[in-house]
């Protein structure tokens, strides 16, 4: 046998694995350059999708349309119990696995629900416009449309020509799929090279616990829990089952598309039925229809969204109600109908339903780089599980083996419990998310290296005072080569001292950027008396002031202010167990309320206006607020209240619906600094346009890691190129 003949005889799954491993090596070798291969991988995926969706539609229409109502009812009866078993087993496993996640603390942010959510979910399921659903890959709506019309075709007498055309179209889809799958090793090579060469593993940060539990839990579910249960119901052995399904599972995983396994699962199931002496010329039709109908709701890997939601609640500090597992399964099943990609919409819906921050959707998308492969493996195995058992049940071949069933359920429960126990034990080592992440935030080292800065602090109750000066601010800064900045203390996330004792924050970073643009040094002086801030600026003791400073009519009369660079809603700091009672202040009796407010004329005036009957306590800062048992709520901005609550478990930032208009935040400057103020305004506009402002907000307000311009580690750059 020649070399080409031997190569052509190699199983497709082997070639696909070779392509995946070669792609991983290529990505590790060339690093970021592997991104150039991404279009080729995308072309391969799009070609697969091109033939898969027509296959689903034509299979459903032809399969259901060619059945009699009696046969369709029989198919439903044989398939429905399988779904119930699959859902029950997966959710039981996910509940056990979720015990490996530490208990979530109370929510950091509490705000009124915006309503909605259900309409978006219905738009994914109800085919109001089938053509739009096809173009947007709304698989649930496509399937609902096909099922309704397939059932309608059953009742049409003159349908042979239509069924013949649908059959031909389905066969054409299978033929095209066969052509495309021949290039699978090359497409998989491109996909895995791009993944291995560009993924930033360090971005996972404190998410390793979720990633490890997800991957191991999904592998356990796909490679033991579901197949061992299948072998307890259908008369077959575990090694035989896994050998027959090997190619389907490999192709689905490496392409990250469960639907690519559909033709292979149909082929395997039909062979299993025929090997057991079932003589039914319509067996292929029965199996194809069963799988096509079950495809959108049979991808049990999508149900791992429920596990993500439990972890997300822990990660964002938003404890879920103890009773959530009574409703979570039903909501998860309804919202995850469709493909792995459609689970992104499910996360949005479920986050809204459970009052989790909208940012958890971005967290889910980021983690899909790693989790989509084991998720697809579970979905591919579950499709095989449902199809094989439904077919065996339809033909009376299913036999419950009690010993195998007990062994499968018992060993599966022990396996998931072992993962949960291991996860809980490893949690302190795998979760690097700090109780107060702001203490670890730092200024960009490259920026610090370009600007010489001197920070004056309050020492033993005394603070360095900047001398009064005269003259134009712009001229003074340029001549002296120094930009003097008054800063507020303990005003997270605007200006504060981090765990290393360095002055940091969004406004501090802005000051560094401004000094760098001017080519001058920095001197920071603490603001110890906010009531005299206007006087200090009028006397030119500071060239500008920072610390999330609000704009007011009084402040506008005293000093010059820059253009507003941020609008932030007002919020209340409250004990977490009482936070939701303040969502609507019209329902709160303010007569006995004790309101704490930061010593600032604007906040003090707002507090007295918003709570005229309450007792107002004015404090110099909120650093000792958690040790003051007398306060009910404290007034601040949402950003600052969230940051404070993040650092103080047991408290939440509450954004009532009727707390007033957002506050405008800007940079105050001396009243006679018109030239300098124009420069600052133009400079702020430039930072907004060149993306610097967005980068600073992502880091200081959202806690996202800074993006590095350095190339990803690779053998080519870091080993050979040294």
Image: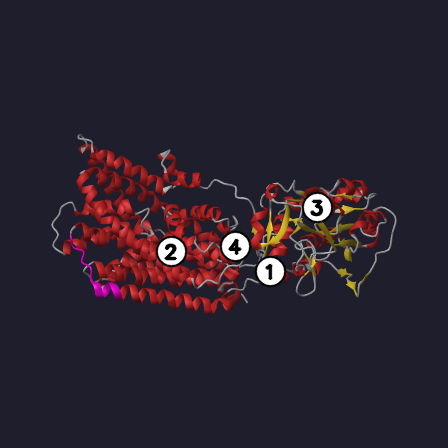
Q: Are marks 1 and 4 in contact (CB under 8 Å)?
A: no
The residue identified by callout 1 is: 437
- Dot 3 or dot 2: first in sequence order is 2
Q: Is residue 454 above or below residue 586?
A: below
Q: Is residue 330 visible?
A: yes
Q: Residues within 10 Å of mark 3 (few under 14, many from 20)?
A: many
- Dot 4 or dot 3: first in sequence order is 4
Label placed on residue 621: none
Separation of disc 2 and disc 1 at Cα?
Answer: 30 Å
User: Which residue: 24% across, 49% down?
Assistant: 79
Q: Residues within 10 Å of mark 1 (few under 14, many from 20)?
A: some
The residue identified by callout 3 is: 607
- Dot 1 or dot 4: first in sequence order is 4
Residue 197 appears at what percent x and percent y? 47, 58
Label 2 or label 1, whichever lies nearer to me, is 1
The residue identified by callout 2 is: 375
- Dot 1 or dot 3: first in sequence order is 1
Image quarter for residue 322?
bottom left
Separation of disc 1 and disc 3 at Cα?
Answer: 29 Å
Residue 697 appears at what percent x and percent y? 62, 50
- In the image, 55 versus 611, the foreground residue is 611
Separation of disc 4 and disc 2 at Cα?
Answer: 25 Å
Seen in the image, is 95 located left or right of residue 30? left
Magenta residues (range): 396-406
SS category of the residue bearing label 1 = helix
Label 4 or label 3, whichever lies nearer to me, is 3
């Amino acid at each position: 046998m020649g070399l080409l003949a031997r190569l052509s005889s190699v199983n497709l799954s082997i070639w696909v694995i070779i392509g995946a491993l070669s792609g991983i090596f290529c990505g590790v070798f060339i690093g970021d350059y592997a991104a150039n291969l991404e279009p080729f991988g995308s072309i391969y995926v799009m070609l697969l999708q091109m033939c898969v969706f027509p296959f689903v539609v034509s299979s459903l229409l032809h399969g259901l349309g060619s059945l009699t109502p009696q046969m369709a009812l029989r198919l439903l009866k044989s398939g429905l119990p399988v779904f119930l078993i699959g859902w029950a087993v997966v959710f039981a496993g996910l509940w056990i696995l979720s015990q490996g996640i530490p208990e979530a603390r109370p929510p950091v942010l509490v705000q009124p629900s915006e309503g909605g959510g259900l309409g978006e979910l219905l738009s994914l399921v109800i085919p109001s416009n089938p053509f739009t659903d096809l173009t947007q890959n709304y698989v649930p709506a496509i399937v609902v449309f096909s099922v309704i019309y397939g059932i309608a075709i059953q009742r049409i007498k003159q349908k042979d020509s239509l069924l013949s055309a649908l059959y031909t179209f389905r066969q054409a889809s299978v033929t095209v799929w066969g052509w495309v799958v021949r290039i699978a090793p090359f497409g998989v090579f491109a996909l895995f090279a791009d993944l291995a060469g560009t993924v930033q593993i360090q971005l996972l940060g404190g998410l390793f616990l979720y990633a490890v539990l997800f991957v191991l839990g999904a592998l356990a579910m796909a490679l033991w829990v579901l197949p061992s249960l299948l072998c307890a119901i259908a008369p077959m052995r575990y090694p035989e089952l896994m050998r027959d399904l090997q190619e389907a599972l490999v192709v689905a995983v490496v392409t990250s598309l469960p639907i690519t396994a559909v033709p292979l699962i149909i082929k395997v199931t039909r062979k299993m039925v025929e090997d057991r002496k079932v003589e039914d010329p319509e067996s292929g039709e029965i199996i194809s229809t069963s799988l096509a109908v079950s495809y959108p709701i049979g991808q049990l890997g999508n149900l791992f969204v429920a596990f993500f939601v439990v972890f997300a609640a822990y990660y964002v500090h938003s404890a879920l109600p103890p009773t959530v597992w009574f409703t979570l399964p039903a909501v998860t099943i309804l919202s995850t109908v469709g493909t792995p990609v459609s689970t992104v919409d499910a996360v949005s819906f479920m986050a809204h339903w459970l009052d989790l921050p909208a940012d958890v959707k971005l967290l889910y998308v980021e983690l899909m780089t790693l989790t989509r492969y084991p998720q697809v493996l579970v979905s591919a195995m579950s499709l095989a599980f449902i199809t094989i058992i439904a077919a065996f049940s339809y033909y009376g071949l299913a036999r419950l083996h009690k010993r195998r069933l007990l062994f499968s359920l018992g060993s599966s429960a022990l396996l998931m419990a072992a993962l949960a126990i291991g996860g809980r034990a490893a949690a302190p080592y795998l979760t690097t998310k700090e109780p107060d992440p702001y203490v670890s935030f730092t200024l960009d080292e490259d920026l610090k290296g370009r600007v010489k800065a001197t920070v004056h602090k309050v020492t033993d109750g005394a603070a360095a005072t900047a001398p009064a000066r005269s003259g134009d601010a712009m001229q003074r800064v340029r001549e002296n080569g120094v930009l003097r900045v008054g800063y507020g203390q303990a005003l997270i996330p605007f200006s504060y001292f981090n765990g290393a004792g360095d002055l940091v924050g969004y406004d501090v970073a802005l000051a560094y950027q401004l000094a760098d643009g001017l080519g001058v040094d920095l001197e920071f002086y603490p603001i110890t008396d906010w009531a005299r801030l206007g006087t200090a600026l009028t006397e030119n003791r500071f060239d500008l002031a920072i610390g999330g400073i609000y704009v007011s009519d009084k402040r506008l009369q005293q000093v010059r202010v820059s253009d507003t660079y941020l609008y932030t809603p007002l919020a209340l700091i409250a004990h977490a167990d009482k936070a939701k009672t303040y969502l609507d202040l019209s329902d709160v009796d303010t007569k006995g309320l004790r309101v704490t407010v930061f010593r600032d004329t604007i906040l003090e005036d707002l507090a007295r206006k918003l709570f005229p009957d309450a007792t107002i306590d004015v404090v110099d800062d909120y650093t000792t607020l958690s040790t003051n048992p007398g306060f009910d709520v404290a007034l601040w901005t949402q950003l600052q209240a969230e940051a404070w609550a993040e650092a103080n478990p047991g408290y939440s930032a509450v954004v009532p619906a009727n707390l007033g208009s957002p506050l405008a935040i800007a940079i105050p400057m001396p009243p006679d600094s018109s030239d300098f103020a124009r420069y600052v305004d133009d400079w702020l506009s430039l930072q907004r346009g060149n993306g610097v402002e967005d980068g600073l907000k992502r880091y200081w307000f959202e806690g996202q890691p800074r993006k590095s311009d350095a190339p990803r580690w690779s053998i080519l750059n870091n080993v050979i190129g040294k």
